[in-house]
Amino acid sequence: MNIKEPKFEISAVSPKQYPKTGLPEIVLVGKSNVGKSSFINTMINRKKLARTSSEPGKTRQLNFYRMDDLFYFVDLPGYGFSKMSKKEQEQVGSFIEEYLFSRKEIALVIFLVDIRHSPSANDRLMYDYIIRSGLPCLILANKADKIAITKVDEATKQIQSILNPIGDIPTLPFSAERKIYQDQVWNIIKEEISL
């Protein structure tokens, strides 16, 4: 899919700040250092549209990236490594919850986990949360370039067996370095936003 003019639109912490365009939204969820920004940059073949941080946990808002007039990528604050205070964590948690459970424009949640590690307790909590929201979901086993290519399929199946043992949610490998996994992800996105 060729996105011609991707742009960062807004960082939001409440519904009154969300875009009013009615475009579908593809939501990115995952730990602070799992590679959500790199995922966006890889998918649209840009180096720096989504800012990657050397300090995990810095994103404290929902970042909306407009993909032409087709849809938004929405990057949610990461979890797990943040240096936020308990109060900040509660505030961020409440606006994420408000967004996930009330935003009508959400077309798909892309849940990124690290292919090198078994899903953490936080990953499993977030997965349960997504399931309870009733939203369509895609699990991406990210950082597939960090393991031998011959082990990617097995590691992806292992993650699915832990998070989604009944296998009713697509679980795919992904890598910002090896750009061989993008087409499958684009196909699922296009299906969910009816392109």
Image (tube, helix red, strand yellow):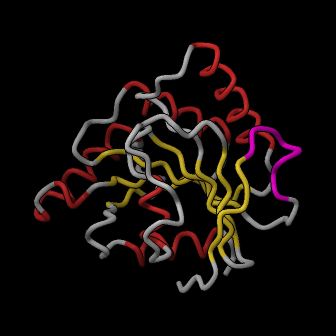
Q: Which residues are magenta?
A: 12-19
Q: Residue at x 35, y 29 (%)?
A: 120
The residue under the point 65% across, 63% down is: 8
Give the mark count: 0
Using residue 157 as the reference point, say whether residue 113 is left or right of it.
right
Q: Position of residue 151 (x, y in %)?
A: 13, 57
Relative to 64, 85 lies left or right: left
Q: Nearer the viewer, residue 7 or 154?
A: 7
Residue 85, picture quadrant: top right
Q: Relative to residue 44, is residue 38 drawn left or right?
A: left
Q: Position of residue 61 (x, y in %)?
A: 66, 40
Relative image position of residue 20 (x, y in whole percent):
88, 60
Q: Residue at x 81, y 38 (%)?
A: 14
Q: In the image, is 68 to the left or to the right of 159?
A: right
Query: What residue is rendered at 27% in x and 51% in y?
Result: 157
**Is 143 drawn above or below residue 121 in the view shown?**
below
Q: Residue 111, percent across and down? A: 48, 48
37 vs 97, nearest the viewer:
37
For residue 193, which quarter of the picture? bottom right
Quarter of the C terminus within the rendering? bottom right
18 in magenta: yes
- Residue 175: in magenta span: no
